[in-house]
Every structure is written in C-alpha cells, then in structure tokens.
Image: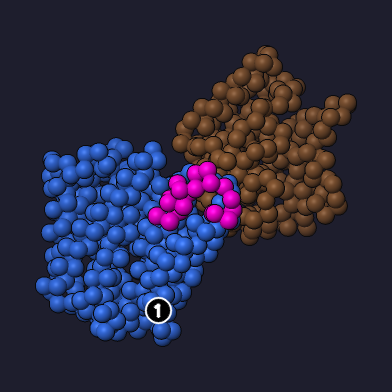
Chain colours: A blue, B brown
C-alpha cells in the first residue's frame, strides 16, 4: 500500500467544508467574546485557536502520503500513551518494560499500515498481553504486580490498540470506498470531533438532565441526544462522498460514532477522576492533553472500523 | 566557538528531546526571573533537571544561566569537565573545603548571572525529597537583595533516575513559584524555602515513586 493518496476531490472537498465550519465557529466565538468578555469566552476562543492548529496538522498529514499519515497517527498515539503512563502510578522496577511498551507502538502501526489484519489483531491483545506479566514476573518484584500489569495492559489497549484502528482504516484502500482509506479516516475523525463539539454545544444550550452525575457531571441527555441527531445527519450526508456507505447506512454509522464517542469520553473521564486529575496534560491550550482530545476516538475508532469490517469489507472475517 | 556549540546543543538536542520524548507541563512560568542577578532553586531527581531548567529560559538568556554543580562529580575526567563547563556552563562547587566555597557564586551574582541551585545537594532517590542544605542560606545572606525563585519538578526522576543510562519517556511537571529574599535568620530562611517548595509540590497530584 505504498501508492500515493490520489487527490480525488471528495477528501479535499470535505476538508474545505471542515474549514468553512471552523471559520464560522471562529466568527461566532469572536462575537460571543465581544458581547460577554470573561473567562468562559476566553477559554472558548483558546479552544477554537487550538482547533485551527490541530485540523491543519491533521490535514497536512492526511493529504501528504499514507506513510506520513501513519507516522502522524503513531506519534499522536505515543503522546496519548505517554500521558497515560505519566499519570498512573508505576513501579521503578518496570522502567525497561515500559520502554518495550513504547516500542510496541511502531510495530503495531507497521502492521496497521501493511493492512495485516491478523497480526494487527493479535500483537497487543495476545502477544503484548502475555509479554508484560512475563517480563514483570522475571523482574522478580511481586509487590504491586497485579496493579502494574493491569494498568499497563489496559492503558496499552485503550490508547495504542484502540487508536491504531485509525491507521488500519487508512490502509483499507479501495475497500473503504470511493475516497479510499484517507476518506474513511477523515470521515471517522471529523465526525468524532464534530460530535464532541455538537454534544458540548447542545448541552450548553439546553442541558438539564445529567447522564453520569458522578463520572462526568457536565454531560447531559440533551447534549448527548442533540449530538447524536446532528452527527447522524452530517454522517448521512457525507457518507456517499467519503465511505462505501449510502445515506441510510451513513446515518447508522453516525449514530455508532456518536454513541461510541460519548462512551470513550466518559471512560477516560472515569480514569482521570480515579487519579484525581482534571486534564490529562497541558499540551493543547483550552483542551488539556492529547488524551483529553482523543478520548472519544478510543472507542469510536475500533467500533467504527470493526462495524465497517464486518458489514462492508468482503471476505476477511468469517 | 563553544558559545555556538552551547546554543546548538540546546536548540538541536535538549529542546527537541524535552519537547518530543519527554513533554513538559509548565505552571507559573511568569515567576521565573527575566534578568539577573537571581537564584533559581529546585529539587533534584535526575541529570535532566539542569537541562530542563535551562530550557525554560529563552535562548538569548543562555550565557547568563549558570547551574551550580559538584566539582568532585563533574570534574572527574577531562571530557566531562569540558562538557560541564562549556556546554552546560556550570560553576563547579568544591564540597567540604575550608575556604569560602561560595566565592565563585557571589562573583557570578555580582556579574548579573542567574544561578541554578539544587539545595538537596545530590540527586538522591528519584521523586523523593531530601533535606535542603544550608549553603543556599549562606549565599542568600551574603547577597540579601538577590531574589530566590523556587521551582518544583516532578517526573524527570522516572525518565532518567540516578544510576540509569536508559531514558524512558515520561511527561514531567515544572511548577515555578513567587520569589522571596533573605530574611534575617538562617533557620527562618530555610523554613521559608521548605514551605514554598511544599506549597508548589501540593499544586499537583505528585505521588512518590519507588
């Protein structure tokens, strides 16, 4: 899969639409800031500025070449995994094992890039899953063993394994529809982030009834359902251009992304709440860390990919 | 020549490593000194501490920044001594000698330099704080108008602890606090330092590591 992404119009058009939305958002936030200056709107405008950076970086990565895109996705995953390992309590004796865990990232993304479905599916859930406890056992310290192997394995799955689905989606090629893997990846990532913003906006405007008061008190039914409907509509519209799905299946894909995204978001919230931190890091002004930005994607990417794999991609699962 | 090497080392090696492999969350950056003379004091976990503190300042401040380091450790062979003196720009401190060991530091402050000091003395056990040595108090007493800027650091001891040669990526936290000055008594000055450091450490959820 070394051939260049062809600059077929759907991906470029979709990126154009995203930038149009971004300009609209910037204008709205600028007006809000003019009308009610304060900490809330300043934070919001910081967020929009960060969106400009993130979307531009993602755009450059996705239109350059599949290799560049994959390296970019692997690097984002590295940052997310590093944030995770920096937040959890680790043992000094496990330092070298953590280094091996980092080295699993390029391997996993290589398998994804080569579209080696079997290796991709087994490398972390089977081989790394068996390797970590073995290495920790041989290191000889049993105190805190279960906690160390449990937290490392879960972190590896929720960050590296889950997010590497973006790379194998990119590598799907023609099976992923008229716009190729890049189109499907753009569809997934753009809709996941769009759903985050839509849920936030609906929640701010109409939010009354809390869904998970203990885990994530900001989340409301109004926000969740508003996001679900908006994202499904956008997904139905965009599906024929970027994916092998028609409008109806696109709406279903949008609903899947909205629900999975929401679940990913609150799962990472539960993790952060357990550790007593608000943000996973300070890398992105107005957003927090990388893990705060890709939280929805940790669920949306595997669920969307495997749904596509099961219902659309032919002959590879039986 | 060494000046160019020093800037190149920080621009091309230290900053990329800190940015990409490690990653820093800096809080209270506005409390760092913008001009000398000043003393920056920090807790000590790793060789990376000095490099990280140096990287917090703009590149043009580099010539003024002088980390203070133990002579017996960093001057033990020629290559290391050259690197420590010219690239890192340390002022070597003789431990346990009878004549005023602080003379070189006082001179540097009089020149308007910014000293970087680790009052714990050595790196010790990573991510565990040792008692602060009183040498800092004698320096502050000798130059009572010089501001002392406390900085608390967490995470670098995990990335590169004492005795390890392998760098493992971890995010690190740097929390800078408001400066204070010499206050008439050694014990009160040391208490102030201790309190300020503890207050900075309490700003994050930093767990001990073992």
Which residue is depicted at the point 20% across and 54% down? A198
Where's the N terminus of chain A, which quadrant? bottom left
Relative image position of residue A24 (x, y in whole percent): 23, 58
Mark 1 — on which chain does it sit? Answer: A
Where's the C terminus of chain A, which quadrant? bottom left
Relative image position of residue B208 (x, y in whole percent): 54, 37
- In the rendered view, tell whether residue A88 sits above or below residue B34: below
Q: Which residue, as the protein is rendered here, is positioned at the far right? A: B98
Give the main secondary structure of the magenta stretch: helix
> Is A50 a magenta residue?
no
Q: Which residue is mark 1?
A: A116
Dividing the picture into quadrants, the one containing residue A16 is bottom left
Which residue is depicted at the point 77% across and 48% down? B84
- In the rendered view, tell whether residue A140 sits above or below residue B111: below
Which contiguous range is marked in magenta? A136-154
Which residue is depicted at the point 62% across and 40% down? B126
Query: Label 1's element?
Result: loop
């Amino acid at each position: 899969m070394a051939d260049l992404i062809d600059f077929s119009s759907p991906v470029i058009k979709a990126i154009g639409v995203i930038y149009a939305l971004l300009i609209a958002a910037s204008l709205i936030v600028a007006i809000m800031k003019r009308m009610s200056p304060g900490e809330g709107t300043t934070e919001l405008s910081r967020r929009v500025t960060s969106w400009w950076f993130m979307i531009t970086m993602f755009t450059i990565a996705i239109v350059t070449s599949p290799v560049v895109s994959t390296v970019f996705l692997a690097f984002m995953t590295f940052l997310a995994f590093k944030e995770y390992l920096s937040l959890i309590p680790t043992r000094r004796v496990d330092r070298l094992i953590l280094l091996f865990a980092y080295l699993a990232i390029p391997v996993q993304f290589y398998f994804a890039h080569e579209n080696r479905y079997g290796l991709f599916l087994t490398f972390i859930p089977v081989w790394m899953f068996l390797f970590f406890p073995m290495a920790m056992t041989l290191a000889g310290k049993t105190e805190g063993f279960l906690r160390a192997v449990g937290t490392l394995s879960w972190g590896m799955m929720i960050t590296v394994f889950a997010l590497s689905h973006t790379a194998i989606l990119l590598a799907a090629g023609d099976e992923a529809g008229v716009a190729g893997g890049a189109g499907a990846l753009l569809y997934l990532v753009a809709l996941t982030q769009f759903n985050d913003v839509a849920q936030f906006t609906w929640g701010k405007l109409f939010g009354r009834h809390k869904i998970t008061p203990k885990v994530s008190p900001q989340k409301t039914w109004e926000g969740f359902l508003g996001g679900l409907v908006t994202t499904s509509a956008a997904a139905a519209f965009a599906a024929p251009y970027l994916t092998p799905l028609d409008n109806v299946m696109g709406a279903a894909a949008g609903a899947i992304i909205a629900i999975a995204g929401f679940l990913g978001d609150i799962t990472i919230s539960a993790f952060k709440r357990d550790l007593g931190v608000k943000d996973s890091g300070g890398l992105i002004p107005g957003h927090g860390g990388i893990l705060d930005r890709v939280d929805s994607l940790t669920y949306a990417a595997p669920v969307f990919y495997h749904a596509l794999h099961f219902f659309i991609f032919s002959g590879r699962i039986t | 020549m060494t000046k160019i090497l020093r800037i190149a080392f920080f621009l091309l090696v230290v900053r990329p490593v800190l940015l990409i492999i490690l990653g820093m969350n800096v809080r209270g950056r506005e409390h760092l000194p913008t001009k000398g003379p000043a003393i920056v004091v920090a807790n000590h976990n790793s060789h990376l501490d000095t490099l990280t503190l140096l990287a917090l300042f703009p590149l043009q401040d580099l010539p003024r920044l002088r980390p203070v380091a133990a002579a017996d450790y960093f001057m033990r062979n020629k290559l290391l001594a050259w690197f420590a003196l010219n690239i890192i720009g340390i002022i070597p401190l003789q431990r346990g000698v009878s004549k005023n060991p602080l003379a070189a530091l006082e001179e540097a402050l009089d020149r308007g330099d910014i000293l970087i000091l680790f009052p714990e003395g050595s790196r010790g056990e990573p991510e565990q704080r040792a008692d602060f040595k009183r040498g800092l108090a004698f320096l502050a007493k000798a130059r009572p108008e010089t501001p002392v800027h406390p900085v608390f650091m967490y995470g670098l001891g995990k990335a590169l602890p004492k005795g390890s040669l392998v760098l493992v990526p971890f995010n690190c936290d740097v929390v800078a606090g408001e400066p204070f000055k010499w206050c008439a008594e050694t014990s009160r000055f040391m208490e102030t330092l201790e309190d300020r450091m503890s207050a900075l450490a309490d700003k994050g959820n930093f767990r001990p590591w073992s």
